[in-house]
């Protein structure tokens, strides 16, 4: 199923920290994603930001007290805890973390958490000395032992003037973990290796051979696998994209480095997706100093690189490992895809038409032609690369390719 926050019931527990104002932006983002957002505010939180702010953003009632007002049918902590698909405590103060760690329930946020059966995401935000205090660290470990997801705070300048770890994490990070918490966990238990981006083959310190791959498709595939519950390793060539939260990332530059990284990591993976655009050749001679213009030769001798996908196809365990390759083609797309599918012993190949409009390298959208070993073909719709990754995983899961 495609990853989406639309219609998801998300409860925010906002406690007394100066960082509370940042959460207004998070709530606004979720409301724009058409999530159903309920907000609980502690008494201390209301000293930093008003309930009116959040009611304006969500269009829903804001909960500030434990007991129901006249005419309300049931206690809020029961109804909110029962209906929530995920609860986010942000900012989470040291006091709140201590309460949750020991099951104390003396106000609406802590009682709602205890009454729920959904994933709980805790985002600590406090002075660095409070965060590093051994008691706070023990309480955080205790939360994790009980299944809470605690996202580490960022380093930075504090409102009090101190510098260190204790700033509320960025929404982009929290959102990734939220998506993982509310998505269909159809990849739980899968260990996925994805390669992405180009490689760079140096000629001298200033020049190299490369291609136009941005890494966007591979990164999207890795992130979608993470959302669906997989344990994901991303091996990436040079890319301007931010490291995906929650995903182990190995950065490489050359084809040889990518070869070494893949072969060091592939054996325990159940799914291997080679979306990287690896250079076919490298320079025979690498100059340690920049070659001046007058010294440049009109012909540069090249040496063929190892074919990572070909070699993985010959050694992987076909009974336990699903192998999917990508092919960037500009003509005879289907014919070339079939040739590579057979030659490299793949289970499935995804073929890019790199000369099509708004698809392939650098573009934000893509269209893939999928072909498997039984001759089944599927032309995916032209969509954003994020949506293409969702559709690709849907196809893999629904057609029983997983080992």
Image (spheres, rainbow, N blue to C red):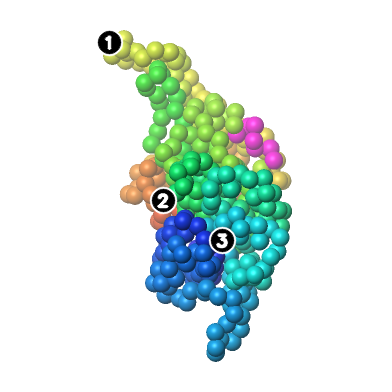
The residue that disc 1 covers is: 294
Which mark identifies residue 366?
Answer: 2
Specify which label sits upstream in the sequence, 1 or 2. 1
Magenta stretch in the rendered image:
262-268
Where is residue 70? Give x, y as percent. 55, 88
Separation of residues labelled 3 and 2 (CA atoms):
37 Å
Separation of residues labelled 1 and 2 (CA atoms):
42 Å
Direction from residue 338 to residue 270 in the image, left or right: right
Judge the density around disc 3: few (<14), some (14-19), many (≥20) Cα neighbours within 10 Å. Answer: many
Membership of 356 in magenta stretch: no
Compared to residue 148, the image places residue 6 above or below, namely: below
The residue that disc 3 covers is: 89
Residue at the far left: name it.
Answer: 294
State the SS at label 3.
strand
Task: Please tell me whether the stretch drawn in magenta is mainly helix, strand or loop.
Answer: helix
Residue at the far top: name it.
Answer: 295
Compared to residue 399, the image places residue 273 above or below, namely: above
Is residue 245 in sight in this rendering?
A: no
Q: Are marks 1 and 3 in contact (CB under 8 Å)?
A: no
């Amino acid at each position: 199923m495609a990853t989406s926050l639309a219609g998801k019931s998300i409860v925010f527990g906002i406690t007394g920290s100066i960082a509370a104002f940042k959460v207004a932006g998070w709530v606004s983002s979720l409301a724009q994603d058409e999530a159903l957002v309920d907000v609980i505010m502690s008494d201390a939180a209301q000293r930093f930001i008003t309930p009116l702010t959040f009611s304006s953003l969500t269009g829903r009632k804001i909960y500030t007290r434990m007991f129901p007002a006249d005419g309300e049918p049931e206690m809020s902590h029961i109804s909110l805890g029962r209906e929530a698909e995920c609860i986010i405590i942000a900012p989470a103060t040291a006091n709140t973390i201590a309460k949750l760690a020991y099951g104390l329930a003396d106000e609406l946020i802590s009682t709602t958490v205890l009454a729920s059966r959904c994933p709980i995401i805790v985002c600590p935000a406090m002075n660095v000395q409070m965060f590093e205090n051994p008691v706070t660290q023990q309480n955080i470990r205790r939360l994790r032992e009980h299944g809470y997801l605690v996202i580490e705070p960022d380093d930075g300048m504090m409102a009090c003037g101190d510098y260190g770890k204790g700033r509320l994490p960025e929404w982009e990070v929290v959102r990734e973990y939220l998506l993982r918490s509310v998505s269909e966990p159809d990849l739980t238990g899968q260990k996925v290796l994805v390669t992405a981006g180009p490689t760079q083959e140096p000629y001298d310190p200033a020049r190299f051979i490369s291609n136009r791959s941005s890494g966007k498709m591979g990164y999207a595939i890795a992130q979608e696998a993470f959302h669906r519950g997989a344990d994901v390793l991303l091996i990436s060539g040079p890319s301007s994209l931010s490291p995906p939260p929650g995903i182990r990332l190995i950065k490489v530059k050359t084809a040889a480095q990518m070869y070494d990284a893949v072969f060091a990591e592939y054996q325990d993976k159940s799914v291997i997706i080679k979306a990287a655009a690896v250079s076919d050749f490298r320079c025979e001679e690498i100059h340690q100093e920049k070659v001046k213009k007058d010294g440049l030769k009109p012909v540069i001798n090249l040496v063929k690189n190892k074919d990572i996908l070909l070699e993985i196809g010959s050694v992987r365990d076909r009974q336990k490992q699903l192998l999917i390759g990508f092919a960037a083609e500009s003509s005879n797309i289907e014919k070339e895809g079939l040739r590579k599918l057979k030659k490299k012993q793949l289970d499935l190949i995804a073929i890019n038409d790199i000369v099509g409009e708004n698809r392939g390298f650098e573009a934000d959208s893509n269209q893939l032609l999928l072909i498997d070993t039984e001759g089944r073909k599927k032309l995916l719709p032209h969509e954003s690369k994020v949506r293409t990754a969702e559709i690709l995983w849907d196809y893999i899961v629904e057609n029983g390719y997983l080992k």
